[in-house]
Image (tube, grey):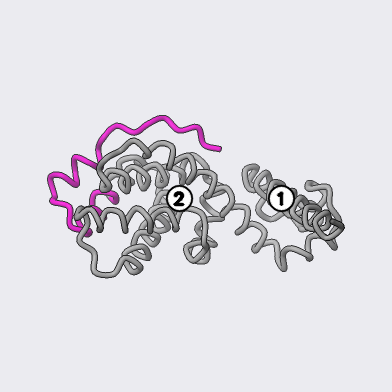
Amino acid sequence: MTENRLERRKARTRAALVRAAQEFIADGRLNAPILEITQGADVGMGSFYNHFQTKEELFGAAVEDALDTFGQVLDSLTGDLDDTAHVFAQSFRLTGRLHRRLPELSKVLLHNGFALNSSGKGLATRARRDIDAAVAAGRFTVADPELTLMVVAGAVLALGEILHAQPERDDAEATDQVAEDLLRMMGVPGDEAHEISRRPLPEVDVP
């Protein structure tokens, strides 16, 4: 019983640190010292190092948690779609738009992107699931889904880089074009890839 209480206390402490980090990211305070983050979480400095070795590791966990929550939103928005290619494209297009809607989270994602890609949760796992489903349904022609996932992850990160570097660029148009190119790469005919990547998107309340 005592051990269970200790585990619950540790889980609460970690969750408080992650929530505080997410608030710092949302406020653009990426250079805040660890002491300020622990004060925001109302935990001691020692408790921080029981869970994370560096501030960057904490920020990575905060972004992973935020993206996992966003992934759950995507799941709810694609659950009624019959076409697996449409599921993939819609999720990608909504994710690409996060770079402008949540610029600070996007910047942390760009610094931790490929590490998050190997995580067991978040958007990468869902993207791999959607790719596998489209392959199984005969919608995608993919020889190596793992390599395809890495290409998709690279596209998300490269898209963020160019949208930050070129603020005048239309983020929706750029995201949809990349989505179309990815669909073509995975075997969807050109005209159909264009049509799928320009379909109306649902409204999203970003968590």
- Total labels: the figure holds 2
Q: Which of marks 1 and 2 is nearer the N terminus?
A: 1
**Amino acid type of disc 2?**
His
Residue 69 spot, x, y in % from top left = 54, 44
Q: What stretch is highlighted in magenta?
A: 178-207
Query: Label 2: how many residues lie within 10 Å, few (<14), some (14-19) or many (20+)?
Result: some
Q: What element carries label 2?
A: helix
When the figure is inspected, residue 180 is found, relative to residue 154, above or below; the finding is above
In the picture, measured across the screen, residue 41 lies left or right of residue 131, that is right
Q: Where is residue 60 in the image (x, y as percent from the top left)?
A: 60, 59
Q: Which residue is drawn at 83% across and 60% down?
A: 3
Give the residue pinned by disc 1: 15
Instruction: Locate residue 196, reporting x and y percent.
Output: 22, 41
Judge from the rendering whether residue 33 lies leftward or rightward of residue 77; answer left or right: right
175 over 155 or under it: above or below:
above
Instruction: Identify the residue shown where x is 26% and y is 48%.
Output: 85
The N terminus appears in which quarter of the rendering? bottom right
Measure the alpha-carbon separation of dots 1 and 2. Answer: 30 Å
- Label 1 packing within 10 angstroms: few (<14), some (14-19), many (20+): some
In this view, 5 is above or below 195: below
Task: Give the residue at mark 2.
Answer: 164
Q: Kindly give the residue lying farthest to the top in the view shown.
A: 203
Q: Nearer the viewer, residue 138 or 184?
A: 138
Residue at the front extreme of this rendering? 1
Q: Does the magenta stretch include residue 194?
A: yes
Looking at the image, residue 105 sits to the left or right of residue 130; the answer is right
- The amino acid sitting under disc 1 is Ala
Q: Which residue is drawn at 17% across and 52% down?
A: 188
